[in-house]
Image (spheres, helix red, strand yellow):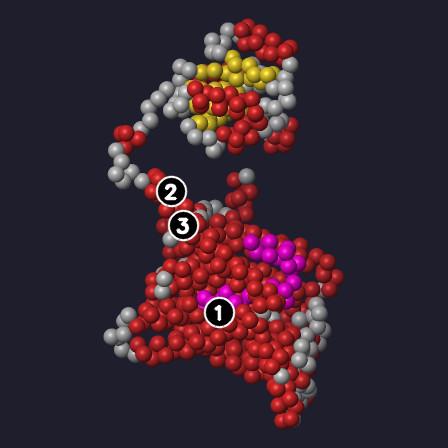
Amino acid sequence: MNNWKRLLVGTPIHTKQLSEEKLTKKKALAVFSSDALSSVAYATEEILLVLALIGTQAFMYSIPIALFIILLLLIVTLSYRQIIHSFPSGGGAYIVAREHIGRNTSLTAGAALMIDYILTVAVSISSGVAALLSAFPALLPYRVLIAVLLVIVLMVTNLRGIRESASIFAFPTYIFVASIIIMIGVGIWKLIGEGWQHFSIPHHTEHFSLLSSLGTTFLLLRAFASGCSALTGVEAISNGVPSFREPSSKNAVITMFWMSFLLGIMFFGITILANGFGVVPKENVTVVSQLANHVFGSGFFYYFIQIFTMLILFLAANTAFAGFPQLVSIIAQDGYLPRNLTKRGDRLVFSNGIIYLSVLAILLIIIFQGDTHALVPLYAVGVFLSFTIGQYGLIKFFLERKSQQKIWSKILIVGIGMIITGIVTIITGVAKFQSGAWMVVVAIPCIVFLFHKIHRHYSDLANQLSLQGQDPKQLIKVSPSKVIIPISSVSRVAINSIGYAKSISNDVVAFTVYFDEKQKERAVEKWKANGLDIPLVTIHSPYRSLLAPLLDYIDTLEDNERGKYITVLIPQFFVKKWWHIFLHNQTALFLRAMLLWRKDIVIATIPYHLKK
């Protein structure tokens, strides 16, 4: 087993090498920005899918919608620049809210971010598979299986360490960015030569008629909310500042500006081309696939863009694998998640967080059958809620330091961002409520409730284990222990256990269950013939149960010998080959499970290793 682990994960890394695992700006851009950059593969399509409900004449509104989203991207980037500088320890909105708003608000931000990261993996992998299926439709029946396998590959890669995963994923990220920018450049050159082909702005009367309906206005807002999926992942850098090389804050800010610049260029360029070439959303064929086909034809460059689009969507999930474990480790340190999430694995990554994220994402993919359009409505609510909370906490932070220069200009920028992202949160929640956003709205308070239950457990545990106000000597329980050895027959395994039991106690009994009188007689005769000098307790089991009579016997002893420890010494032989396990019953395991919750019962196993 250990050899397999070393093959998949690699050799352990010494703790003192943690600083060497920090990321340069180039690698960090690939790790933390792939989610945001990959959203250009589906953000425009999500806008068009909603506008199609109005009619193709509404597609021309995708351009102003895209401009508003880019403006929002700029404001959010400026706001999170302040968060990175002010809170370089990572954790983003959760840490900001914890320090300057309140516990429940910070837990709400933490829950929203956790949901966003899980959805990032599910949506990104599903979108990557959709891009693959656009080029290879024959693989459509295997969509869910392919998506699950990709999550597992990504999980194993990240378990090998953040620096190694960054080295693997940096090349495809930069190739994708370059290929999309080249496609936009060539596409605009073709538009200039061929002219604008479809979706021109309608006449004034048509324009007025289109906007006159309340339902139409709502759909336009819903299209804006869908397009805001382009901003998911922007917060990842603020959550992972400790992963950057020093000066970590400066490097994180520079990386964030590059990410926002590239995201804005690609998102707006694809929206322009979709309008110019009259692209209409089609089932199982993405908008990017249609654009690549129109710009380059169905030759090499078309498949090149499809493959690297699939790869960047696959790698977008890697942003979550970098951010989610870091976030949940901070929440776990505060006592609101299991403490095993704070532990680093062999490769200095938060291995348990990576595994939990993978399992939850796989469950989502299976439940929604890898359908990107079914998953996307769940996507943006959590991230924009965390945007709003983070910026509100940052404003409170600035107000506490209002003596500093230029503080009011920072409050103005962050305040505008908070208002806009708050409005977007409401729009997204309302517009996508029936499409699936209600699940996120319900899930966030449920997760916060779970946080409090976990924290209450840890608090109760600490109180019960504390020695404060207690005399340790009075707590020490000194009493003779009775040892029970359950045996099925008189054998070397039983004799080995009896020898150990007599070394720790003078009160030892063996216990066996018989189903008929002949079986009992054989056991007693063999016991006497071997000259064993401890009592053998035999209990009849009319219903052929092995565990129930032993549990009844232990109950009787507990009633008669209150205040004493009872040690159940379980003899167990271990086979040499793994498949031999299936040739023997596992009574010892079931017995341990049954006794584990009993008070004053000590459970011990005496191993006997077989040679063949």
- Name the foreground residue: 20 vs 456: 456
Check disc 3 and report its element: helix, strand or loop: helix
Residue nearest the viewer, comparing 263 with 361? 361
Residue 478 placement (x, y as % from top left):
33, 24
Contact between marks 2 and 3 (CB within 8 A): the answer is no
Disc 2 and disc 3: Cα gap in Å?
A: 10 Å
**Disc 2/disc 1 C-alpha distance (Å):** 36 Å
Where residue 306 sits in the image (x, y, percent)?
A: 65, 68
Numbered mark located on residue 384 in the image = 1
Q: Amino acid at mark 3?
A: His
In this view, the mark in front (2 or 1) = 2
Q: How many C-alpha atoms fall within 10 Å of the one at disc 2: few (<14), some, or many (≥20)?
A: few
Residue 608: in sight, yes or no?
no
In contact (CB < 8 Å): disc 2 and disc 1: no
Residue that appears at 49% across and 24% down? 555
Figure check: 13 above or below 300: above
Q: Residue at x 49, y 11 (%)?
A: 535
| Residue 411 found in image quarter | bottom left
**Residue 587 vs residue 103, the one in the foreground:** 103
User: Which residues, given as a range, are shown in magenta?
Assistant: 360-387
Which residue is denoted by mark 2 in the rendering? 461
Q: Is residue 405 left or right of residue 93?
A: left
Callout 1 crowding tier (Cα within 10 Å): few <14, some 14–19, many ≥20 = many
- State the residue position of label 3: 455
| Mark 1 element type | helix
- Mark 2 belongs to which amino acid? Leu
Secondary structure beneath dot 2 equals helix
> Residue 383 in magenta?
yes
